[in-house]
Amino acid sequence: MYSIIIDGFCKEGLVNRALELFSEMGRENISPNVVTYTSLIYAFCNLGRWKEAASLFDNMMECGLSPNVITFNVMIDALCEDGRTTKALSMFDLLLQRGQMNEAMKVFAAMQDRGHEPNVFTYNALINRYCKNMRINQALCLFSEMRHRQLIPNIVTYSSLIGGLCQVGRVVLAQNLFNEMQVQGEKPDLHTYSILMDGLCKNKHIDEAMKLFHEVECSGLDLNIIIFSVLLGALFRVHRVEDARKHFSTIFEKGLKPDVRTFTLMIDGLFKEGLLVEAEDMFMEMKEKGCFPDDVSFNVMVQGYLLNNEIKYVPCCQ
């Protein structure tokens, strides 16, 4: 009953009376629902009272209520109308972060229906989320639509798509996009290189990953520990232990410090090659260099001993 009356007051522009009832609900220990909050948010947005609208939205989330499509539509539409597109896009991104893809697409369509044209940021947010959910065909449709609207894809667009395509095994198309982005004047950064290298490795295109690594070395980009970790993991997958050792040494030569993931990759690879003593030495080196093992590292040690039938060492690996 309260929600119906509050909604009526809001539609009549009687926001203060609606707020009085909202406060009364609190005093009576009656919990407002999504409709209650949405009605008030809509009223505040109409009056340009953004702080109150945002405060109610945050309060709604803190109470464990999930804003629905209407709530997001109200906020995003009002913000767009007021020219506050950055804030509107952050609201849209929040919807995506919550994994509400269907709701996000409804809001996306509603924004266009109201004349709020999506920009590169909006498309990137959608494409990235679709790629993470392995819904690559939908991501590619948006990519095509984006270009049809004469919006220029940027490095974020391409990196998301390359990663998504590699996840579903479509490596050739990922490589084509990688080449296309450079033709279009978008220079890949280390993050993009790492994504494609990792995708090539996981799809067993190790030689192509190695070529890409050498391309990075010649590109003038400063190598980081992430790209070395990708490379080491790839080398151990194809039992190229000596190459892995060599590139691990290169890390120090480049003035970089291996992180816990890098050390753990090395330890895991050495154990799988039956090089138990070297794996133990690597574990000790890791601690000596101030890189403290995590749960994954300890699990790798336990699994490594078991793999090499050295059960007696399992309790002592810490």
Image (cartoon, rainbow, N blue to C red):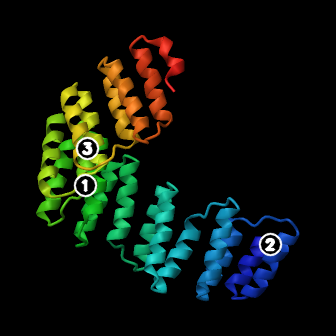
Q: Which residue is mark 1?
A: 190
Dividing the image into 4 quarters, which one contains the N terminus?
Answer: bottom right
Q: Observer-nearest residue: 279 or 97?
A: 279
Please give the name of the residue rendered at 38% of the width and 13% of the height, measured from the top-left corner: 308
**Which residue in the structure is indicated by mark 3?**
251
The residue labelled by disc 2 is: 2
Residue type at mark 3: give it: Ile
Looking at marks 1 and 2 on the same chain, the residue that comes earlier in the sequence is marked by: 2
Q: CA distance from mark 1 to mark 2?
A: 55 Å
Q: Left or right? Give the position of 90 relative to 212.
A: right
Q: Nearer the viewer, mark 1 or mark 2?
A: 1
Residue type at mark 2: give it.
Tyr
In the rendered structure, find residue 150 and report the number of the disc placed on it: none
Q: Which x, y percent locates residue 189?
A: 23, 58
Provide the secondary structure element on which disc 3 rests: helix
Q: Which residue: 67% across, 61% down?
A: 65
- Label 1 amino acid? Leu
Lateral position of residue 30 relative to residue 113, left or right: right
